[in-house]
Image (cartoon, grey):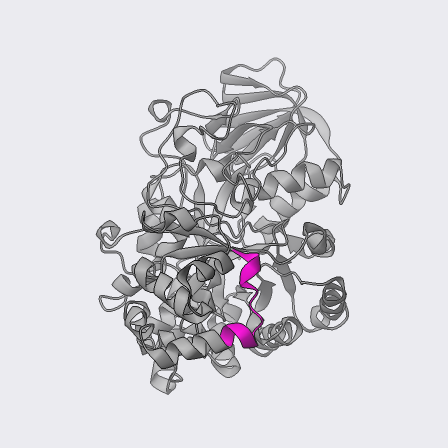
Amino acid sequence: MFDVLIRQATIIDGTRAPRFTADIGIKGDRIDSIGDLSAAEARQTIDAAGLVAAPGFIDVHTHADGWLLKSPHLLPKTLQGFTTEVLMADGISYAPVTPQTWRDWIFYLRALDGMSLDEYSGWSSIAEFLDRIAGRNVQNVIAQVPYANVRSAVCGWGRQRPDDFQMRSIIRGIRKAMDEGAVGLSTGLDYIVQCFATTDELVAACQPVAEQGGLYVTHMRYKLGLLPALREAVEIARRSGAKLHVSHLKAQTPQAADEVLTYLDREASREVDLSFDVYPYQSGSTMLSYLLPYEVWESGPIAAVERLRDPQVRERFNRGLTEHRVEIDKIHIAWVASKENSRHQGKLLSDYVDSRRSSPGDALADLLIEERLAVLLVVNEGDDPLVTPFLQHPKQMVGTDGILCGAAAIPFSSGPKPESSDNPPEALRLEGRPHPRVFGSASRVLGPLVREVKLFSLEEAVHKLSGYAASRFGLKQRGELKPGNFADLVLFDPDTISDQATYEEPLRPTVGMHAVLVNGTPIIEAGQPVPSERLPRTLPGRHLRCER
């Protein structure tokens, strides 16, 4: 007898193979059989006629670290079919930390999830942090090694280069995390601490990654310029021997896209083993603190608030906004921590600056001081068709780069789905105006981009979301529907699956996802989250280890 029997599904197995119709029998956490199981019995049977069965999707670039720690079910992600989250992107996260750095990290990352100091429970290593999530969440998680955390733990927050002793300590820390199952090393070279790292330093940091066949996953030095940043990333991978994965790779003009993809195909791919991710939107989202001059970070995030009171720092901030041609009339305030400033959510930075009757540097520095850095932005970088050539590329996979706004945890919901997004279910009660990519990336790829735009086949779309991501990130026995593999799978209607979130209404959930199973346990049924009382006491999400 099977625990779960899925009948008459159209199977797209994650390998790009043509679809076929069959039954799927699940025992425990594994797929036991695929074929004609019409005579079989099961404790639970799902009629999947007219639905596609596919492997559970893997979000290879996510900022859900803090949310997963405090919330058992991220419905915006599971309703798209994401069963695994690759955490600790852009070189920044909640671990590893030391007694000297943990407060600064929670303070710095508040703009991504609103976590507070009282939610810290004493972890220090990556493994300890992820073990607090495993079994308390419905999704699987796997870690990267966030370089800023490792560097700050060894060297502090300053711009000084690590000496030989410090570099050996950094390498030991990375090697330990790799031994514990991390996928590779992540960097965000425009962000705190890492902005001070040299190319040579990063080559050395990648050596233990290369030794274990891991990935160098990088938010490149985009402020340097797209092509120079990509050339540096390729150099780091080539010199260290690590495989390269570029985060959210896209361009702001068709000419720049053609230039960077030509370089990638004709030169870079001959030098290194590479891949990249991108979400199906041209606009981006980041913290307001991303725009600050690097000097602000030299004593850490908490001290940065006082640095922003310095008139000379403000002047350099204002000058940098002009020199880097930051178009504040194309940037919206997505979320702020305080109720006092919440009226500005959804408004342009330029409107906020005008309301303060001061220079952009002074106005935005004041906002960061008032919010203690907790300000999130949505950045208009052009029309969505600009990202099309990147989405079509065979080296591309999907990373949502999704950032949820708000300080409240997301509990389960067992109530009916509302007709209007103005009154979302409890599981979707968030704050602010986040980027719609967090609610719609996978469903936009599976639906409109396959059906209407015809960018690629549904088999190719599923492969990018599952099989390709699993193989690249070392997730053995996942990402493909076949007997013996873990039963992470999704059931969706290929005719209706679609994103509903927009920039005006970013909290609207995906439609068309019928069921989601994680390690054999249903977490979505009939398009609704399974009520908590029907789930096992130990939730099905696991802390996965990379297997190379």
Residue 380: where, in percent of width, then height? 59, 56
Q: What range is drawn magenta here? A: 320-331
- The residue located at (59%, 63%) in the rendering is 246
Give the residue at the far front of this rendering. Answer: 357
- The residue located at (76%, 41%) in the rendering is 453
Residue 157: where, in percent of width, then height? 33, 75
Residue 325: where, in percent of width, then height? 58, 71
146 inside magenta stretch:
no
The answer to which of 219 and 538 lies nearer the viewer is 219
For residue 540, say whether it is visible.
Answer: yes
- Above or below: residue 218 compared with residue 382: below
**Would residue 483 appear left or right of 412 to someone viewing this image?**
right
- Above or below: residue 16 compared with residue 164: above
**Would residue 65 appear left or right of 483 to someone viewing this image?**
left
- The residue located at (55%, 46%) in the rendering is 437
**Would residue 193 appear left or right of 303 to someone viewing this image?**
right
Residue 133: where, in percent of width, then height? 35, 45
